[in-house]
Amino acid sequence: MKRISYWVLSTVSAVVLLFGFDASQRGATSTPTATISGGTSGTKSGQSSGSDNSTSSGNSSGNSSKNSSGNNSGSTRSSTKTVTGSVAQTQWGPVQVELAVRNGSITKVSILQYPNGNGRDVEIARYSLPILIHETLSSQSANIDMVSGATYTSTGYLQSLQSALDQANL
Amino acid sequence: MTVSSSPLQRYVAHLMGMPVSLALRGRHAEDEAARGAWERCVAELTEVDRTFSTYREDSVVSRLSRGEIDLADCPAEVREVLGLGEQARVESAGAFDVRCPGPDGVPVLDPSGVVKGWAVQRASAHLRALPDTDVCLSAGGDMVCHVADESRPAWRVGVEDPLDPQQLVATVEVRRGAVATSGTAHRGEHITDARTGDLPSVVASVTVLADDLTWADIDATAAYAMGADALTWLRARAGRRGVVVWRDGRREVFDSH
């Protein structure tokens, strides 16, 4: 469960990074809240509360039921709440994210609004998004899946970000 | 659009003197099929190392380099890799070369600049064959990315800061393609300009995104070896994107799509 919530959180942050990266938001850990109002920050730190100000219920899965069932076993007794974030204006257009929260953990992220709306444009937008250049960005706030760096040896690997990612299985 | 909360499963092995990290998500992230594909991937990379390692006295490449065997006696993969190396040498105007001056001035055959990207790209096929499964396979910081399901997000790759490896200089998203970085952060000065034998000084690292890792890796290595000419050369390469980090900390993005 913990892993799932982290994973989804990283998805949220990635979206924010994609669209919300400007000088004012460079402060790393504050970025998720910049786009998503509601339970996100609570979930991130404690992963036990965080859903206090969430509202509407039910409507848990738009179209991604295939993953959620197997991974959330044991938590079926509590209902899923959805938290809808406010619309963030980015240089590519408005972005709005919705979270599904169960037992204080985020189980799903839906992107309600993306620049240019329809799915096909979304794909194009994702594909053509620029490489994001950071002044400095610590690994903890980056929410990345893998690290590309100068070829490291197995010895150097032990101190690397990639090693941290692998060990945490995030 | 929905981004499903697909969990990530990670696998790590140490091969060819470097860590090989795999992330899978989707239908076969952590089942028998996944483990089988990972085992075949590792076995293939191990076999490649046995053939190509310059650290093994008895490898095909070591024997070829010493002139004990002929190219005609080598497995087809060796000829393929050397062919790629020759293409890279021509396209980089000699900055990239699998034959480098050895300590005593005698040219030494070292195709490792081609082998890694080529081998990992090829071995990733075992994993990419898993139905409805997303793959990110990295060997020492160079990776193949594959997203099988359009509803799932791209792989997010952080580009390490060569001047401070605990930091990132950039983030890139890749659905299908490869990311390779050449620089000095972890291995010290290990790339020289094949034209002069000089160590490049003005470039700290080069990161290249391309359709496959064979060429992402070759281009990153070649551009890094070029030093001051790196960016100009990369901008003329079709279908490449990436970042050059200069020694003074400047970062420049290129996109030749």
Image (cartoon, coloured by chain):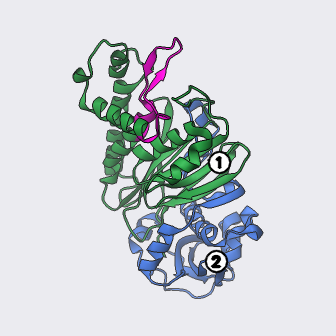
Chain colours: A blue, B green
Depth check: give the residue in front, B169 or B11.
Answer: B169
Label 1: element kind: strand
The local crowd at label 1, few if under 14, some if 14 to 19, many if 20 or more residues have their Cα within 10 Å, is: many
> Which residue corresponds to the image point at 37% horizontal and 13% vertical from the top-left?
B66
Instruction: Give the image quarter of residue B46.
Output: top left
Depth check: give the residue in front, A23 or A163.
Answer: A23
Q: Is residue A49 visible?
A: no
Numbered circles on residues, count: 2
Three-letter code for the amino acid on which mark 1 is drawn: Val
Q: Chain of mark 2?
A: A
Numbered range of the magenta stretch = B91-117
Residue A7 on image: x %, y % = 55, 62
Instruction: Give the image quarter of residue A133.
Output: bottom right
Q: Is residue A67 above or below residue B243?
A: below
**Which residue position is annotated with label 2?**
A91
Q: In the displayed structure, does residue B249 sit left or right of residue B7?
A: right
Depth check: give the residue in front, B90 or A148.
Answer: B90
Residue B35 on image: x %, y % = 36, 46
Q: In the displayed structure, does residue A138 sit left or right of residue B103?
A: right
Label 2: element kind: loop
> Which residue corresponds to the image point at 56% horizontal and 25% vertical from the top-left?
B197
Residue at the extreme bottom of the image, as rendered:
A56
Between the residue at mark 1 and the residue at mark 2, the CA separation in whole angstroms equals: 25 Å
Q: For residue B101, which numbered disc appears in the image?
A: none
Q: Is residue A40 above or below residue B112?
A: below
**Which residue position is annotated with label 1?**
B245
* Badge 1 and badge 2 both on one subunit: no
Three-letter code for the amino acid on which mark 2 is drawn: Gln
Magenta span includes B101 = yes
The local crowd at label 2, few if under 14, some if 14 to 19, many if 20 or more residues have their Cα within 10 Å, is: few
